[in-house]
Amino acid sequence: MAQTAAADFHVRLAKTPEDYHAAQRLRYDVFVRELGGGGAMVDHDAGLERDRFDPFVDHLLLIDTARDAVVGVYRLMRAEMAAKAGGYYSEAEYDLTRLKTSGRPLLELGRSCLLAPYRGGVGMHHLWSGLARYVAQHRIEVLFGVASFHGTDVASVAAPLSLLHHRHLAPDTLRVRALEQSFQNMDLIDKAHLDRRAAMVQMPSLIKAYLRLGGCVGEGAYIDHDFNTVDVCLIMDTAQLNDRQARIYGAQDI
């Protein structure tokens, strides 16, 4: 199935139970069927990937209007939502103290996924533009969330993890750290021996997109055996965006 034209996309927040189930079905297709993930609240009979945070967050949907189908999703959690939920999702993997005590408006990004035919094209651009409008509407200053390498074989992703460690660590004031019970050092290949070009080829497209916007990572990776991934915590300080990068934050509300 080929990706449809840009004019066939619409981005909006989920509003109805049907919208939420569509987001959870998409997550099941990607995270469970495609990538082999799991979790205590995954409903295999209904084909829904869900967890305890879903009732507290906003779900940003990318809709292919020609098919009337949800083909992409972002899960968005602001600080007041996290307070009601008893914390952020990322706190199961990272110590977020430095972010939470920064005094700056935060937004956690999670469960980002698109159906395979829509990856790397205009669909992702539309989803990111919708995210940018949400960020502007709520005056968010720092975005963060875990992003994943598929599989738990750390040796197979040693090069991109090392590149993130050597070149893209967050500044000290925002540098969260993976929790000790599953902490994975990312300094696996000495800088002098690292093939940066090859490492970037191995980098997942979502992580590369954040890096192009000036994103950085926390200290250490986290091995998530439930989702069959090696996770890093991505952080983006909107104050550090240059004028070209920041243009997308000036659009209308969703």
Image (spheres, rainbow, N blue to C red):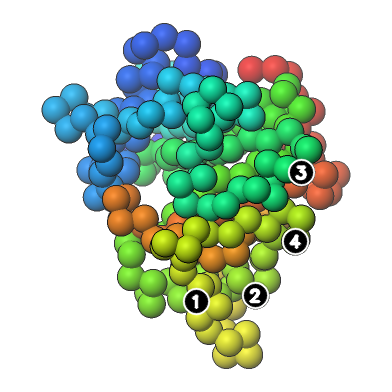
Task: Report the Cα–Cα distance between label 4 and label 2.
Answer: 14 Å
Q: Which is more toward the observer, 112 or 174? A: 174
Q: What amino acid type should be assigned to the residue bearing mark 4?
A: Asp
Q: Which residue is depicted at the point 47% across and 11% down?
A: 15
Task: Report the Cα–Cα distance between label 4 and label 1.
Answer: 23 Å
Q: Secondary structure at mark 3?
A: loop
Q: Quadrant of the C terminus?
A: top right
* Vertical relation: 40 (above or below) 139: below
Q: What amino acid type should be assigned to the residue bearing mark 2?
A: His
Task: Please give the residue where the numbered disc 2 appears in the rendered image.
Answer: 166
Mark closest to the chain's N terminus, 4 or 2: 2
Is the Cβ of the residue at disc 4 closer than 8 Å to that at disc 1?
Answer: no
Is the Cβ of the residue at disc 3 closer than 8 Å to that at disc 1?
Answer: no
Q: Which residue is depicted at the point 55% across and 78% down?
A: 187
Give coordinates of residue 102: x percent, y percent. Answer: 76, 43
Give coordinates of residue 170: x percent, y percent. Answer: 70, 60
| Residue 159, numbered circle | 1
Give coordinates of residue 243: x percent, y percent. Answer: 85, 44
Mark closest to the chain's N terminus, 3 or 1: 3
| In this picture, residue 61 sits left or right of residue 102 | left
Circle 3 packing at 10 Å, graded few (<14), some (14-19), many (20+), is few
Q: Secondary structure at mark 1?
A: helix
Task: Report the Cα–Cα distance between label 3 and label 1.
Answer: 31 Å
Q: What amino acid type should be assigned to the residue bearing mark 1?
A: Ala
Q: Which is more toward the observer, 234 or 211? A: 234
Task: Please give the residue where the numbered disc 3 appears in the rendered image.
Answer: 102
* Vertical relation: 169 (above or below) 15: below
Task: Please give the residue where the numbered disc 4 appears in the rendered image.
Answer: 172
Q: Secondary structure at mark 4?
A: helix
